[in-house]
Image (cartoon, rainbow, N blue to C red):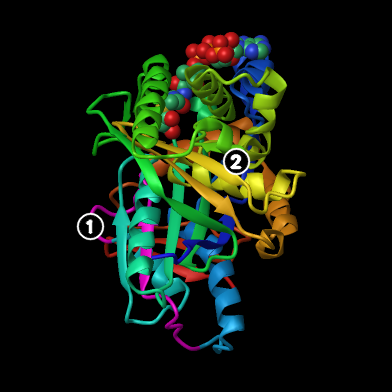
Amino acid sequence: TGMRVGIHDLAFATTHQVLDLRTLAEHQGIDVNKYYIGIGQTEMSVPCADEDIVTMGAEAAAQIVARLRAEQQAEDGQAFDGIRTLLFATESGVDQSKSAGVFVHSLLGLGEHCRVVELKQACYSATAALQFALGIVARDESEKVLVIASDVARYALDSSGEPTQGAAAVAFLVTADPALIEIEPVSGLHTDDIDDFWRPNHLSTALVDGKYSLAAYLRALEGAWTEYRSRGGVDFEAIDRFCYHQPFTKMAVKAHDKLSALVGSPLDKDQRRAQVAASLELNRRTGNSYTASIYVGLLSLLERDDADLAGRRIGFFSYGSGSVSEFFTGVVRPGYRDVLRTAADERALDDRTAIDHARYRALHEGIDAAQGSDYETAAETPGPFRFAGVSAQVRRYARTA
Ligand code: CAA
């Protein structure tokens, strides 16, 4: 069919505290430029004691649902029936059985006639959610699918991954005739059973083979790109901007250099940078947000690129360790800027409370200390939703306003 399907609305949230990587570098006695320049990260978002993937995911999705309610003149207090599927992508899940999406469904007052499920495959699963959503809408163009990707990236204190922690969420609405970006049908896939990054059930922090994970990411890019081309995907020159999974922003730069070399692109270094630069700005300040990261990158690109991107094609490379990856493209819709919340997204970063090194470590250690018992969290977050604690072994969430 000739129907366009894609992303109609895209919203962002992060935690309400931040650690400047200068603080970490000073504590470690190293040159901060290893972080600012070497890995391309300046800050990382740190959750308050009462924030997690659910509170971030709900804060992102609430913006989309509020806009839909206003458009459909649905009343605030009443259940909202406009969304019949909610897909929650994460690799930092809060329960082994119940989907984090069910908590969000309740916090947002969505109607009971809705399927809600959580998806996991490291940082890749938001792209799986996008593909599943496109299928649902292609079958029935009246459907609206809400996708949430939300993660807290945690490595052990004093490990090599520590500076690449972070946290953020995106929510996006997949519909027919989308206002932001039409996703094109061709994609290239690559799966390989490897141990580059993983998190065993008994650990709250991820394990990683750092240098190997970089090589694995680049090899997967080549594999996914090659299949993308063999299935009739457009050539490199027909793609105007690129949006990569960003465990740290320098990784996207390395990936784009690799792909450019692979296709023998004549573009010089500055021209190549210009194809990815705007996509790095939000991630540089949130840190890794795993599943959300590539879509935080898309939002950053749409908000921060000076050029009018309407009608331009964006190439996406989504990578999830372990590993599963996909290359696909989308074309930006006319009028896309009217859909964005650029000032609010910048405020979400600027308004975070800076924390010192001792507080950061205490919060990091506090997560493990809390496992397994009932407890109440300290009321810290200024955000609209909070994780109130665990009672009778059940996680409790609340609206703050
Ligand atoms: N000024 C400027 N640059 C400096 C510098 C200074 N003073 N000091 C060091 N650098 C540069 C280095 O030259 C290096 O750059 P290049 O790679 O371009 O040569 C960069 O800073 C990093 O330095 P090191 O390689 O020495 O850093 P490290 O050994 O501490 O490890 C890391 C870096 C492997 C990325 C580590 O942070 C890590 O393990 N991170 C977690 C794993 C990860 O993010 N992997 C990415 C692929 S897997 C994936 O994508 C899934 C996912 O989300 C995790």
Q: Secondary structure at mark 1?
A: loop
- Residue 113: quadrant of the picture: bottom left
Using the image, tell me which numbered label, if any, was put on residue 97.
1
Indicate the position of residue 77 as horizontal and vertical percent values. 52, 87
Using the image, tell me which numbered label, if any, was put on residue 340.
none
Residue under pointer 2: 286
Whether residue 158 appears in this view of the structure is: no
Mark 2 Cα-neighbour bin, 10 Å: few <14, some 14–19, many ≥20: many
Tell me which residue sits at (36%, 54%) in the image: 131
Q: Is residue 27 above or below residue 54?
A: above
Residue 280 inside the magenta-drawn segment = no
Query: Along the polypeptide, which appears first: circle 2 or circle 1?
Result: 1
**Disc 2 residue type (three-letter):** Thr
Mark 1 Cα-neighbour bin, 10 Å: few <14, some 14–19, many ≥20: few
Indicate the position of residue 121 as horizontal and vertical percent values. 30, 42
Q: Which residue is farthest top?
A: 30
Residue 92 inside the magenta-drawn segment = yes
Tell me which residue sits at (60%, 41%) in the image: 286
Indicate the position of residue 362 as horizontal and vertical percent values. 51, 37
Q: Quadrant of the N terminus?
A: bottom left
Q: Secondary structure at mark 2?
A: helix
Give the dominant element type of the magenta stretch: helix, strand or loop: loop
